[in-house]
Image: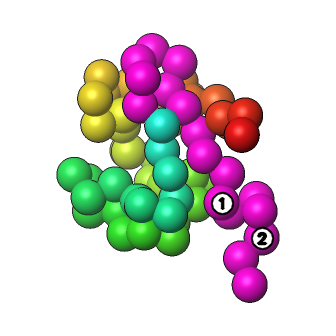
Amino acid sequence: MASTFTKQKYRCKDCIYSYDPAKGDKSQGIPPGVPFEDLPASWVCPLCKANKKRFVPRKS
């Protein structure tokens, strides 16, 4: 059973995009089930191209 930590969604501080681990990121080849913490350092926001450091945990 996956922990709630791995289900945590993160939102970009620069645009409206939220990364949802249940969906992954098809545009960059990230399959569903990959937690935000496990995304490669090279991953960027698919909408505005901000890097991972610009993301914060989404509340509910």
Q: Is residue 20 magenta?
A: no
Q: In the picture, residue 57 is in which quadrant?
A: top right
Residue at figure coordinates x 77%, y 62% from the top left: 4
Identify which residue, 18 or 51, lies in the foreground: 18
Q: Residue furthest left?
A: 27
Dominant SS of magenta comes to loop
How many marks the image carries: the answer is 2
Reading the image, the residue beneath label 2 is 3
Q: Is residue 50 left or right of residue 54?
A: left
Residue 5 position within the rendered picture, expressed as x and y whole percent measured from the top left: 76, 59
Classify the position of the C terminus by image quarter. Answer: top right
Residue 55 position within the rendered picture, expressed as x and y whole percent measured from the top left: 56, 30
Residue type at tag 2: Ser
Residue at figure coordinates x 28%, y 29% from the top left: 47
The answer to whether any part of residue 38 appears in the image is no
Residue at figure coordinates x 71%, y 76% from the top left: 2
Mark 1 element type: helix
- Callouts 2 and 1 close, C-beta under 8 Å: yes
Q: Is residue 3 left or right of residue 13?
A: right
Residue at figure coordinates x 72%, y 34% from the top left: 59
Mark 2 element type: loop
Residue type at tag 1: Lys
Chain part drawn in magenta: 1-17
Residue 48 position within the rendered picture, expressed as x and y whole percent measured from the top left: 30, 22
Reading the image, the residue beneath label 1 is 7
Q: Residues within 10 Å of mark 1 (few under 14, many from 20)?
A: some
Q: Residue furthest front?
A: 60
